[in-house]
Image: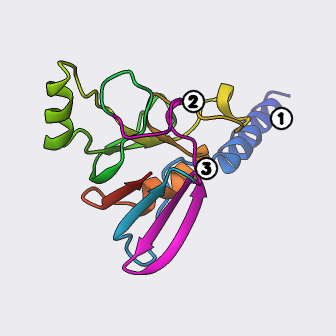
Amino acid sequence: MRAITLLGILCSALLVAGCSSSKFKSYDGPPVTLVVVEKDNRSLHLLSDDRLLKSYKVHLGFNPVGHKSIEGDGRTPEGIYKIDRRNPNSEFHLSIGISYPNAADKARAKALGKSPGGDIFIHGRPKKYRDGTRDWTAGCIAVTDRQMEEIYAMVPNGTPIIIKP
């Protein structure tokens, strides 16, 4: 009887292990050389030179019109930045950082006597925003968790990102 119970537990463990999948994917296709975000149509594109590799629908800051100026304005920045860091333990599944604020962003905020903010990322979506019906981030760019797994694997640090109005 004990052997049957042990066998059942072992089979269950193997079944669960076989069904689990890592959030860390691998990618061996053409290199992503540019990320382009178009805020007006809520899209993110991964390019290899002039060739489109993938496109995704995105959600933006809760106040999406205009360039991010100060911390707390709810806007997603606009301009040319770089992917500069990774967070494998993000509160939002996985995330890759955007080099906002740059020198011009800092100067603009300083002239207003404010902080430009920071911690702008491309990241996944928590359960409460999975209905996909509205912009909700504090200025980040959000995709589904599965899409974020692809992006995390495909886009290396140092990749330029252009965020268009």
Structural distance between the alpha carbons of marks 3 and 2: 19 Å
**What SS does tag 3 mark?**
helix
Q: Is residue 116 above or below residue 143?
A: above
Q: Position of residue 126 (x, y in %)?
A: 60, 30
Q: How many neighbours does mark 3 have within 10 angstroms: few (below 14), some (14-19), or many (20 or more)?
A: some
Name the residue: 58% across, 53% down: 147
Q: Position of residue 52 (x, y in %)?
A: 50, 76
**What SS does tag 2 mark?**
loop
Q: Which residue is mark 2?
A: 136
**What SS does tag 1 mark?**
helix
Amino acid found under the numbered disc labelled 3: Arg
Kindly report which numbered mark, 1 or 3, lies closer to the viewer in this rendering: 3
User: In the image, is 49 to the left or to the right of 21?
Assistant: left
Total labels: the figure holds 3
Q: Is residue 56 above or below residue 90?
A: below
Q: How many neighbours does mark 1 have within 10 angstroms: few (below 14), some (14-19), or many (20 or more)?
A: few
Which mark is on residue 4? Answer: 1
Query: Looking at the image, is mark 3 or mark 2 earlier in the sequence?
Result: 2
Is there a contact, CB below 8 Å, between mark 1 and mark 3? no
Which mark is on residue 99? Answer: none
Q: Is residue 36 above or below residue 116?
A: below
Q: Which residues are magenta?
A: 41-68
Q: Which residue is mark 3?
A: 146
Amino acid found under the numbered disc labelled 1: Ile
Q: Position of residue 17 (x, y in %)?
A: 65, 45
Name the residue: 55% across, 48% down: 22
In depth, the one of 11 and 94 nearer the eye is 94
Structural distance between the alpha carbons of marks 1 and 3: 38 Å
